[in-house]
Amino acid sequence: MIRISSLIAALAVIITLCALTSCNDPQNMQEDIITNEEALEVVEAYVVPANGGVVSDVENITRETESMTLVEFCDSTYLDTINYQFDRLNRQASSEIIWNMNVSCNNFSIPESATMSVATNVELSTARIVASGNSTFSGSLTGLELLSTEVTWNGSYIRTGNSDLTFKNANRTETDLNLALTNLVIDKSSLTIISGSGIYTLNTVVNGTAQTFSGTITFNGDQTATIVVNGQSFTIDLNP
């Protein structure tokens, strides 16, 4: 009888603990895990211009450089700030883009390239994600010559911050995107991306559960991009 009573008491303790901790409830565990499709939404949010992503940064700065008389800044550093706002349907974004460039000119004082340093503070709200954070870009910009019809960006983009993933029952989601851009070509007249690629790593922490996603981004030249998340391929619209 003593053994039976002890067993009953032990079971009672286990049941009580399960009630308090959900005993690894699959539903709770699922809320802590981000799928490839959901990771795609985070990467997309940090890339597309409507969300104040990296494409917004490079397109806005390209627009500014095209409106400047760059010869005035040969072999010197230029510093400026761009305030970006987007508000349409269920998507709002605002960012402050603080950028500086060091313009390199040839022997005839014709601007050819620049080293770029960009820091951006971003707030974003969509039907699925509400996020705030900051990003940095460090790299180069070539094709500044007047006769050139395109500019090319190369560099490293880092985005960190906190997100409320409305598709998750998450108190707080920490995100960290590291993206290396290679030969991102922008048409000067239309300010649209012609081609380019990137390799990224996305780190997330949802309710204390850490995950890492990695893959590539290919800009297709038709205002879409192909994003690979842990081997799974998706195509997104750069102007949703």
Image (cartoon, helix red, strand yellow):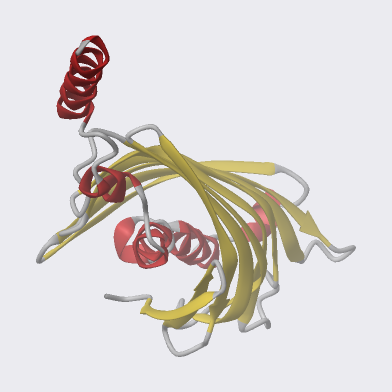
148 or 219: nearer the viewer: 219
117 shown above or below 180: above
| Left or right: residue 34 compared with residue 183 | left
- Residue 120: in sight, yes or no? no
- Where in the figure is residue 81, as x and y percent of width and height? 43, 42
> Which residue of the protein is positioned furthest toward the front in this rendering?
1
Q: Quadrant of the N terminus?
A: top left
Q: Residue furthest top?
A: 2
Q: Is residue 193 left or right of residue 103?
A: left
Relative to 14, is 202 above or below?
A: below
State the residue at coordinates (55%, 61%).
65
Which quarter of the figure is the C terminus placed in? bottom left
For residue 33, say whether it is visible: yes
* Occupied quadrant, residue 216: bottom right
Query: Horizontal and vertical percent for residue 181?
Result: 64, 63
**Residue at horizontal 59%, vertical 59%?**
200
Task: Classify residue 146 by image quadrant.
Answer: bottom right
Answer above or below: position of 232 versus 155.
Answer: below
List the single residue furthest toward the left.
89
The residue furthest right is 107
Which residue is pictured at 21% across the width and 29% down the height?
Answer: 18
Which one is nearer the viewer's eye here, 230 or 86? 230
Relative to residue 237, is residue 176 drawn left or right? right
The foreground one among 103 and 16 is 16
**Percent position (x, y) of residue 40?**
40, 65
Q: How many marks?
A: 0
